[in-house]
Image (cartoon, rainbow, N blue to C red):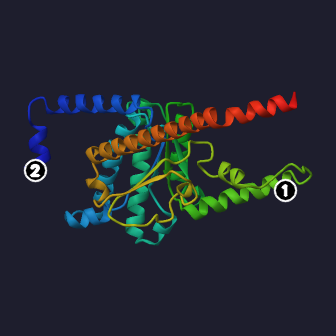
């Protein structure tokens, strides 16, 4: 019997764990510094399967289970938007057997996410599938469109599932929209193409800016995920040296705590700097303003 099975068999273990999680979530929420938008590069499912002598599809299934637990903690802690890198366009280059298994898993899990009593209903989550859906077969597209339709009126939080997706394709998609807008507004001298317009036409353009990006498996690269959004000032990046199925709520809790502490510390320093500026102005500049006022009078 493994350690998890042993601890979970202790009387009251589940209730105690749930109580601790609720206390933690409330504490994070009241801090008012929780990340509004968190992105996940869920890397390591295949290596997890090899390490544990499992089939590749079982590794991906373990990864989905981890995703559910992590998202549950995030939403309970006050995160408004989560974006998960579920399938890269580059993944189509993998073996047909693995691609087929991933497509089947996606169909099953999309249905599960929006099923009665599951995460979307429990937390009021709007599901959005972002990426080039034209690359998928009709049955999977229909399931994904159905999930978005069923959850479109949910207001509590957003779950972006990137499938199939790359950051470069997202930028190209935005630029195509911008070109169409420019053509439609060719007679308007006030129409300007700038960063704000490009950002607004990204898949995540109507959502809070990315605050926190987490990547597992020990790799130090973005793998073409949210490359525009992650370049914004202030985005925290956490590179975790463990495989995604091993990335549990405890690690996620620690990252949230660290983010909240750093954000609180940063906000306090900014407030102190602003107060210092006010003091400097009151003491040094007030006399000069009074003199100018007298001269103008």
Q: Is residue 141 above or below residue 275?
A: below
Residue visible at 51% across and 36% down in the picture: 271
How many numbered badges does the structure rendering display?
2
Residue visible at 48% across and 62% down in the picture: 88
* Residue at disc 2, secondary structure: loop
Q: Is residue 212 above or below residue 215?
A: above
Task: Left or right? Give the position of 181 relative to 55.
Answer: right
Task: Left or right? Give the position of 112 relative to 287.
Answer: left
The single residue placed furthest to the right in the displayed view is 187
Q: Percent x, y for residue 285?
A: 67, 36
Nearer the observer, 13 or 22: 22
Residue visible at 63% across and 52% down in the picture: 202
* Residue at disc 1, secondary structure: helix
Q: Percent x, y for residue 74?
A: 39, 39
Nearer the observer, 205 or 273: 273
In this orientation, does residue 32 appear? yes
For disc 1, the neighbor class at 10 Å (few under 14, some 14 to 19, many from 20) is few
Q: Is residue 230 above or below residue 51?
A: above
For mark 1, what is the residue?
A: 183
Q: Determine which of the numbered discs, if any, sits on residue 2 in the image.
A: 2
Q: Percent x, y for residue 143?
A: 51, 46
Q: Quadrant of the C terminus?
A: top right
- For residue 23, what is the image quadrant? top left
In this orientation, does residue 126 appear? no
Q: Are marks 2 and 1 in contact (CB under 8 Å)?
A: no
Mark toward the start of the polypeptide (2 vs 1): 2
For disc 2, the neighbor class at 10 Å (few under 14, some 14 to 19, many from 20) is few
């Amino acid at each position: 019997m493994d350690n998890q099975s042993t601890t979970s068999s202790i009387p009251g273990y589940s209730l105690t764990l749930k109580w601790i999680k609720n206390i933690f979530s409330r504490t994070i929420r009241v801090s008012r510094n929780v990340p509004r938008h968190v992105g996940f590069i869920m890397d390591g499912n295949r290596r997890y399967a090899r390490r544990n002598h499992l089939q590749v599809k079982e590794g991906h299934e373990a990864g989905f289970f981890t995703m559910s637990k992590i998202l549950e903690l995030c939403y309970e802690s006050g995160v408004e938007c989560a974006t998960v890198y579920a399938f890269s366009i580059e993944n189509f280059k993998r073996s047909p057997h693995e691609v087929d298994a991933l497509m089947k898993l996606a169909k099953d899990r999309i249905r599960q996410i929006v099923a009665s009593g599951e995460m979307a209903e429990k937390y009021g989550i709007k599901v959005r599938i972002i990426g080039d859906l034209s690359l998928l077969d009709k049955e999977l597209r229909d399931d994904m469109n159905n999930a978005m339709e069923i959850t479109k009126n949910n207001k509590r939080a957003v779950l972006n599932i990137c499938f199939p997706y790359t950051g470069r394709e997202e930028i190209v998609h935005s630029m195509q929209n911008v070109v169409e807008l420019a053509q439609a507004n060719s007679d308007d001298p006030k129409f300007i193409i700038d960063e704000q317009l490009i950002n607004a036409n990204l898949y995540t353009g109507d959502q809070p800016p990315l605050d926190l990006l987490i990547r597992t498996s020990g790799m130090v690269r973005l793998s073409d995920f949210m490359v525009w959004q992650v370049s914004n000032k202030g985005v925290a990046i956490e590179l975790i040296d463990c495989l995604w199925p091993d990335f549990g709520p405890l690690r996620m809790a620690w990252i949230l705590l660290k983010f909240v502490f750093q954000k609180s510390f940063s906000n306090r320093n900014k407030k102190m700097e602003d107060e210092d500026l006010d003091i400097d102005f009151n003491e040094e500049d007030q006399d000069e303003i009074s003199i100018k006022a007298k001269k103008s009078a």
